[in-house]
Each structure stands twice: as structure tokens, then as C-alpha cells.
Amino acid sequence: EFFPQTAPVAVKAFIDMCNAGFYDGLTFHKIVADYLVEGGDAAGDGSGRPPFTYPAELASTPIVAGTVLMRPASPSPPANGSQFVILLRPEASWTGQATVLGQVVEGLDVVRKISRLPSTQQTEKPNYRPLQEVRIRELTIHEKAPAGPGTGS
């Protein structure tokens, strides 16, 4: 589920990149067991340049398990690019520090399974790189059907 009310530019950029096939075939380049998975880098290791950058949209949206946020492309001025993080546990200290794109509403068990794959941990650079390549087959956007009469909302 996307949060266009608090991150309209990020939501539009992410959806546009998905629709253009940008994420298809990219890897999750960083995994930390039961904490986070990170992907969306064209270079495949977190060092790549995004196709474009746009301003960060910091909000007080709570950071809970399943929160999807944009990894900053640059800290000053705060800017987003293509990399995203899916968190697997609450992180109150991150509230207001990153652009919250949305929330995983289905499939968090799969994300958790990916996070538990063997990785380089802290023994070699890049840290927490999966030992086995994990690729995004295809990212597709499905619009939620509007609530109709008798559906409760």
C-alpha cells in the first residue's frame, strides 16, 4: 500500500520506475536477518547512481514491520533515488528521517525469508550482501479497487 498523502513525489517516481521496468531483474543487494532487505540499485551493490533524484519527503509516519522507505541517494540536501528498504521490525528512531513510501500488506513472510539467507555479514565488503543472488523478477503495480456499496468502506 502506497502513502501518496505523505510522499506524493516518491510514490509517483516509484510507480513510474516500476511501470518502466526499471526494477525488473535487479537484486536485493543488502539483507540483514529479521531487520531489513534493500534493493533497487542498478549497479547491484548499493553504489549505483539512480536514474534521477528527487527531494526527500520526511514525515512522522510510524516505522513498523513492513514499512517501505526510500534509501537516501544523497544526505545533503536530502534526496531520494531508486533504492528502497523494507524493514522487518519497528524502528521508532527512523521516524521523520526517511521518506516512507508505503507498507507491505501481503508477503512480509517472503521478505523475512529473504532476510535470513546467508550473507557476508560484516566479514567482507560489501557488508550483508547475500551469498546467493536474489533477483526481483518483476515489480508490478496493482490499483486497489475502490470501495463500493456494502463493502464496509
Image: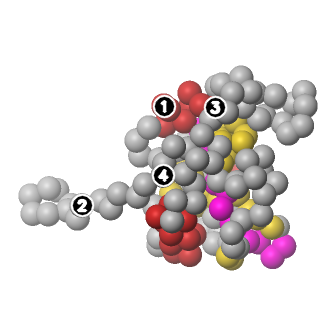
The amino acid type, in three-letter code, at marker 4 is: Leu
- Mark 2: which secondary structure? loop
> Is the residue under label 3 in contact with that under label 1 (CB below 8 Å)?
no
The amino acid type, in three-letter code, at marker 2 is: Ala
Q: Distance between the Cα atoms at labels 2 and 1?
A: 24 Å
Near mark 3 (Cα within 10 A), the count class, few <14, some 14-19 or many ≥20, is: many
> Is the residue under label 3 in contact with that under label 4 (CB below 8 Å)?
no
Dominant secondary structure, magenta: strand
The first of marks 4 and 3 along the sequence is 3
The first of marks 1 and 3 along the sequence is 1
Near mark 2 (Cα within 10 A), the count class, few <14, some 14-19 or many ≥20, is: few
Q: What mark, if any, has residue 115 been given in the picture?
A: 3
Percent across and percent down for residue 107 are 44, 37
Res. 87 visible in picture: no
Give the residue at mark 1.
109
- Mark 4: which secondary structure? loop
Q: Distance between the Cα atoms at labels 4 and 2?
A: 19 Å
Please report the residue visible at 87 percent of the width from the left and 30 percent of the height from the top.
Answer: 122
Query: Which segment did they paint magenta?
Result: 76-90
Q: Distance between the Cα atoms at labels 1 and 3?
A: 10 Å
The amino acid type, in three-letter code, at marker 1 is: Asp
> Is the residue under label 2 in contact with that under label 4 (CB below 8 Å)?
no
Give the residue at mark 2.
145
Note whether 35 is above or below 105 in the view shown: above
**Would residue 85 appear left or right of 110 to someone viewing this image?**
right
> Is the residue under label 3 in contact with that under label 2 (CB below 8 Å)?
no
Give the residue at mark 4.
139
Along the viewing direction, whichever of 135 and 57 lies nearer the viewer: 135
Q: Distance between the Cα atoms at labels 1 and 4?
A: 17 Å
In the image, which is nearer the foreground, mark 1 or mark 4?
Answer: 4
> Is the residue under label 1 in contact with that under label 2 (CB below 8 Å)?
no
